[in-house]
Image (cartoon, helix red, strand yellow):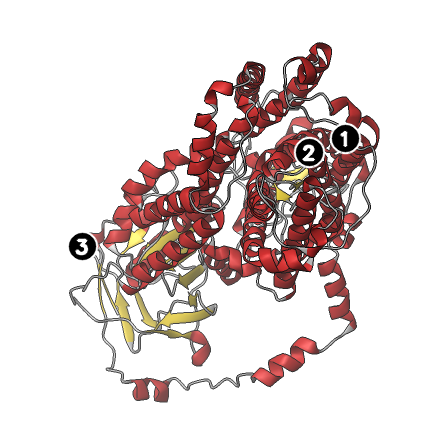
């Protein structure tokens, strides 16, 4: 690598005003479409558009065409059975949070799953009850139908028992949540989740975990604690618990402690040896079976006063109409429930879509969850989202599609109609213990606070403010406070960036939009991409998508295809079906080789390509042997222009690092130019640099980077004296346009002394 001090250049060109520049480079005037034209185009219907709309609204049509019964069905069956057993237990447990009878939690693992099977775009999430949503539903239920005192003045409550009133509130609220989600999906506002950053969701879910933990103390200790809602409800709940602490049921307490210790211990074993275990040990199911047996044998309910699940009807109750009065009283609560449920599900779905290389549609997910909750609400189901632990079971046990989800719903149906009576002696303290154990991941998020305080204090303020507000003021108000804090940090950072005034050494470059002028071209093999704004949680995905559009390929897919190709070549070499000749690697037979659809080692495909054991270096832009197809990459260098990037947050930093590594791993050199020293220092503090990403990728200007690129990748024809135009393509991140550095009447001379000088 050349030392910066040895590379010098100067520029001689006419002085340009805007008018003079437009005179020399004729400006292109583009006709912009009117609003009416966009409206007409939106409502124009063609056969192709109707077909695409049908596939979009019913994603099952798309993925069922490619479903491989031979390779996937067995995996989906095993995954469906495992997920179904977990869904049964979590459905029973999470219904306690909603303050409704336990068997209605089973409905949440059945009815919404059926609807999502047809409408959902994620192939791996497990739809059903989610503890945070159940708790938010429970807050509305206890507010309208309190443990003590009269219920709300609702006409539909007449003639109903307290349990039936609570079920009506829960079902109506779920129905209303579904209406909100369906409406947002039809209005195409799935982008709203962009404004729920990782930091806000982390603080919010941690606060929800604290609420859930406190709410389960009454089951773990065997106490009768009335439900509280509204600000400071957690304080009132703790006060009631400690007031009655001397009345603790020792059998409930001991049972809960034993269950928690065993489940935590085995879960730790599952995590430590997950590479060796084909299926995680279902310790929750095992402990549930043991607890049911012990409770039945010793008659815990009558002999020791232990509160058990009780009778589970072996039938599905008839659907009911939602109460419009509940709609009026719970509309303010339903909207945040709809947002949180969708945000959590979409975040989990996005993780698995990236891992398994398929696309999910945020707006279609809103439609899917909206329809699922409307359908479930009609059958008295809890509000549905997804639980990370349950989705992890479905994916880790080999689930390939939502066929696994459908089979898990069948398992739940078998429990409801056939063997639910076996769960009747199950102590509620066991369910409470299971809920508490599943909170470990959410509660452990608190360890990120010191890291955020050191690396990004505005993000830390959002986390702490959201968490504390949600704990003490309630989840709904806490979410609103978190959004307010988040918007304030964005406004603060955007309006008061860490700006600098650079010293003027020389003014030698002109950059403009390539689409606005004629006779401007780009150098071969180089793409320059300009980021036109700060990068943060709300636009990092947009930035990465536009970058892929600009270069014309998805680097992660290229990397995975290359790794698959290398593995295939090594396998063929080992079998003797590929030999080394003077012309390179040649296949011994001309039969086409089918590409395997196995996704069991997707993590390995994302790692840098391992060329060991290959006798030659692979030229990926040439024809590959044995009919192996890998898309070519037509660039060798990518320049990211950070001249207007005033700040990065933690979410953007992670996304940027992932994007750069994807390009580096397919042999595309990445350079960053015009970066603020404040950002470089922040990248250092946040451990951005490693063996792959080094500080040497940063250059002061685009010219500096381009000179280094020309030194590293010399053009096909090299001469000591070159006259002509030296121009770079520049792609604008906001509109994917191209900007060029333009010099007129340029002359370049490369000298051979110790300090070469390049003149333009």
Q: Position of residue 562 (x, y in %)?
A: 58, 43
Q: Is residue 54 left or right of residue 677?
A: right
Disc 1 target residue: 312
Question: First in sequence: mark 1 or mark 3?
Answer: 1
Against 638, residue 26 (above or below) is: below
Residue on which the image places disc 2: 102
> Which residue is tagged 3?
755
Residue 245 x/y as whole percent? 47, 22
Query: Observer-nearest residue: 215 or 589?
Result: 215
Give the CA distance from mark 1 to mark 3. Answer: 86 Å
Name which of mark 3 and mark 2 comes first in the sequence.
Answer: 2
Left or right: 760 as drawn, with respect to 368: left
Q: Position of residue 705 (x, y in %)?
A: 32, 57
Q: Is residue 303 above or below residue 429?
A: above
Residue drawn at point x = 74 percent, y = 33 percent: 80
Q: Nearer the viewer, residue 587 or 743?
A: 743
Binning the other alpha carbons within 10 Å of mark 2 as few (below 14), some (14 to 19) or many (20 upward) gives: many
- The answer to whether mark 1 and mark 2 are in CB contact below 8 A is yes
Mark 3 vs mark 2, CA separation in Å: 80 Å
> Secondary structure beneath disc 2?
loop
């Amino acid at each position: 690598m050349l030392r910066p001090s040895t590379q010098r250049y100067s520029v001689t060109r006419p002085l340009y005003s805007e008018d003079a520049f437009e005179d020399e480079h004729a400006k292109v005037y583009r006709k912009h479409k009117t609003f009416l034209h966009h409206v007409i185009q939106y409502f124009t219907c063609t056969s192709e558009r109707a077909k695409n709309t049908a596939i979009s609204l019913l994603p099952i049509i798309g993925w069922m065409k490619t479903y491989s019964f031979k390779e996937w069905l067995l995996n989906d069956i095993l995954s469906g059975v495992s997920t179904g057993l977990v869904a049964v237990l979590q459905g029973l447990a999470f219904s306690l949070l909603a303050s409704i009878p336990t068997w209605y939690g089973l409905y949440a693992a059945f009815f919404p799953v059926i609807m999502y099977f047809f409408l959902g775009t994620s192939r791996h999430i497990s739809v059903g009850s989610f503890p945070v949503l159940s708790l938010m539903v429970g807050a509305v239920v206890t507010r309208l139908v309190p443990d003590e005192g009269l219920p709300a003045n609702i006409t539909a409550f007449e003639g109903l028992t307290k349990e039936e009133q609570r079920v009506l509130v829960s079902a109506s609220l779920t129905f209303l949540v579904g209406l909100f989600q369906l409406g947002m999906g039809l209005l195409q506002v799935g982008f709203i989740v962009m404004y729920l950053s990782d930091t806000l969701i982390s603080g919010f879910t941690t606060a929800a975990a604290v609420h859930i933990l406190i709410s389960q103390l009454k089951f773990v200790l065997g106490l009768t604690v009335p439900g509280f809602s509204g600000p400071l409800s957690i304080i009132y709940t703790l006060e009631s618990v400690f007031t009655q602490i001397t009345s603790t049921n020792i059998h409930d307490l001991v049972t809960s402690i034993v269950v928690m210790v065993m489940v935590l211990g085995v879960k730790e074993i599952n995590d430590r040896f997950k590479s060796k275990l084909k299926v995680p040990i279902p310790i929750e199911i095992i402990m549930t079976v043991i607890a049911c047996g012990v409770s039945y044998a010793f008659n815990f309910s009558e002999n020791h006063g232990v509160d058990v699940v009780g009778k589970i009807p072996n039938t599905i109750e008839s659907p009911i109409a939602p109460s419009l009065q509940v709609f009026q009283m719970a509309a303010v609560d339903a909207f945040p429930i709809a947002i949180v449920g969708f945000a959590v599900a979409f975040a989990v779905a996005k993780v698995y879509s990236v891992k398994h290389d398929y696309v999910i549609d945020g707006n279609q997910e809103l439609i899917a969850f909206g329809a699922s909750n409307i359908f479930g609400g009609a059958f008295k189901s809890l509000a549905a989202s997804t639980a990370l632990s349950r989705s992890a079971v479905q994916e880790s046990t080999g689930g390939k599609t939502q066929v696994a989800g459908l089979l898990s719903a069948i398992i739940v149906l078998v429990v409801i109609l056939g063997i639910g009576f076996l769960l009747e002696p199950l102590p509620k303290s066991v369910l409470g213990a299971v809920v508490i154990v599943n909170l470990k991941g959410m509660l452990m998020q608190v360890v990120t606070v010191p890291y955020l305080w050191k690396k990004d204090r505005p993000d830390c303020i959002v986390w702490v403010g959201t968490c504390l507000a949600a704990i003490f003021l309630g989840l709904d108000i806490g979410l609103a406070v978190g959004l307010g804090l988040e918007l304030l940090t964005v406004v603060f950072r955007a309006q008061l960036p860490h700006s600098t005034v650079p010293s003027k050494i020389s003014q030698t470059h002109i950059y403009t939009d390539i689409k606005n002028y004629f006779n401007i071209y780009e150098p071969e093999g180089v793409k320059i991409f300009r980021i036109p704004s700060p990068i943060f949680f709300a636009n990092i995905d947009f930035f990465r998508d536009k970058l892929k559009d600009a270069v014309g390929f998805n680097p992660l897919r290229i990397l995975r295809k290359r790794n698959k190709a290398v593995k295939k070549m090594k396998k063929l070499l080992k079998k003797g079906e590929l030999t080394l000749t003077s012309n390179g690697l040649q296949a011994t037979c001309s039969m086409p080789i089918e590409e395997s659809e196995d996704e069991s080692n997707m993590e390995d495909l994302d790692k840098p390509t391992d060329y060991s054991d290959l006798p030659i270096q692979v030229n990926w832009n040439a024809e590959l042997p044995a009919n192996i197809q890998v898309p070519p990459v037509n660039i060798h260098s990518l320049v990211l222009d950070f001249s207007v990037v005033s700040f990065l947050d933690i979410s953007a930093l992670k996304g940027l690092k992932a994007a750069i590594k994807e390009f580096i791993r397919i042999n595309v050199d990445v350079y960053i130019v015009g970066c603020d020293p404040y950002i470089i220092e922040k990248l250092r503090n946040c451990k951005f640099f490693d063996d792959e990403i080094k500080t040497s990728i940063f250059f002061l200007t685009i010219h500096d980077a381009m000179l280094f690129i020309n030194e590293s990748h010399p053009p096909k024809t090299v001469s000591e004296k070159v006259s002509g135009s030296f121009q770079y393509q520049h792609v604008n991140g906001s509109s994917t346009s191209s900007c060029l550095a333009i010099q007129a009447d340029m002359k370049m001379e490369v000298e051979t002394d110790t300090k070469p000088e390049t003149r333009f």
